[in-house]
Amino acid sequence: MRVALVQFEPVFGEPDRNFARMAELAAQQRADVYIYPELALSGYQFIAQEEAYALSEPADGPRMDAMAHLASTLDACLIFGFAERDGTDLYNAAAAVFPDGQRLVYRKTHLFYKETLFFKPGNTGFFVFEYRRLHIGMAICFDWFFPESYRTLALLGADLVAHPSNLVLPYCQRADFAAAVQNRIYIATVNRTGAEHREEERLEFTGGSVLVSPKGEYLLQGSRTEEAILVADIDPAQARDKQLNPYNNVLGDRRPAQYRLG
Ligand code: ACM
């Protein structure tokens, strides 16, 4: 089972150009699952609701169909962030699109900073799906800050958390070590590179995408600034073995009744 981390620099407001770059990078390496950054089609830093609306699209919109066509061409599952429109509501979402055109959408649970001005908090909850016998869960960027996100996905049976990101803080790539070990899962944090400067604010993204194994090995690490497609083979059996030693099971040993707040 080969996973590709597609780290690139989306250009704000140019979804056709971004789509072309996503396809171009994917064509460089074969994989079963390709993971891209958060808001990969639109760019990140919206400054007006109308703009966010104009750069959003429904899960069955034409660009999503183009991504499904790309999934079919690559014979792979593509996971990427996009601004989802549902009626008049907008969500910071991640889609998993499959070669047969089907798609699943996860809506970001924990919105970061000014995303709260443009998007509604996600209402899908976390879920896990199966692709080529790999159990995959999705989380988006700031979701990582809340241990409940990865924990929930691990308890739901995820082998791999696909984590499209637009990180501006330096912590996540290192924190993934603890989350991967604590939950015995693979984590693929796929971050964008470059910067966006809109009105008075400049945001610099930290790149450095990582794939971390259930034992905390950094199987892949991207550079801070360069675009790249990084690939590695992963073994779901490693994530399914939750036994730390003959006495301890990392999920089975939880004591929820003892985690009372009062
Ligand atoms: C983030 O959630 N984009 C930091």
Image: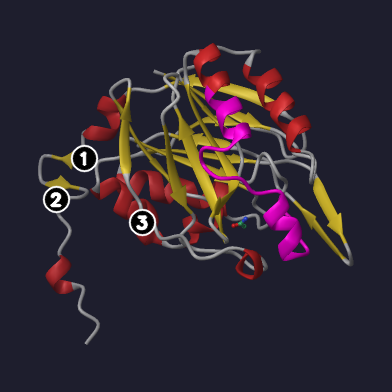
**In the rendered structure, are the residues bearing label 1 and label 2 in contact, judged by CB atoms less than 8 Å apart?**
yes
Instruction: Tell me the element at label 1.
Output: loop
Residue nearer the viewer, 186 or 133: 133
Instruction: Tell me the element at label 2.
Output: loop
Q: Is residue 63 magenta?
A: yes
Q: Start and end of the magenta stretch?
A: 44-68
- Looking at this view, name the residue that lies furthest to the right: 200
Above or below 150: residue 131? above
In the rendered structure, which disc, 2 or 3, sits on the residue that comes first in sequence?
Answer: 3
Above or below 260: residue 86? above
Residue at 74% of width from left, 61% of height from top? 50
Residue identified by numbered label 3: 125
Tell me the tag on residue 242.
Answer: 1
Amino acid type, mark 2: Gly
Residue 17 horizontal side relative to residue 183, left or right: right
In the rendered structure, which disc, 1 or 2, sits on the residue that comes first in sequence?
Answer: 1
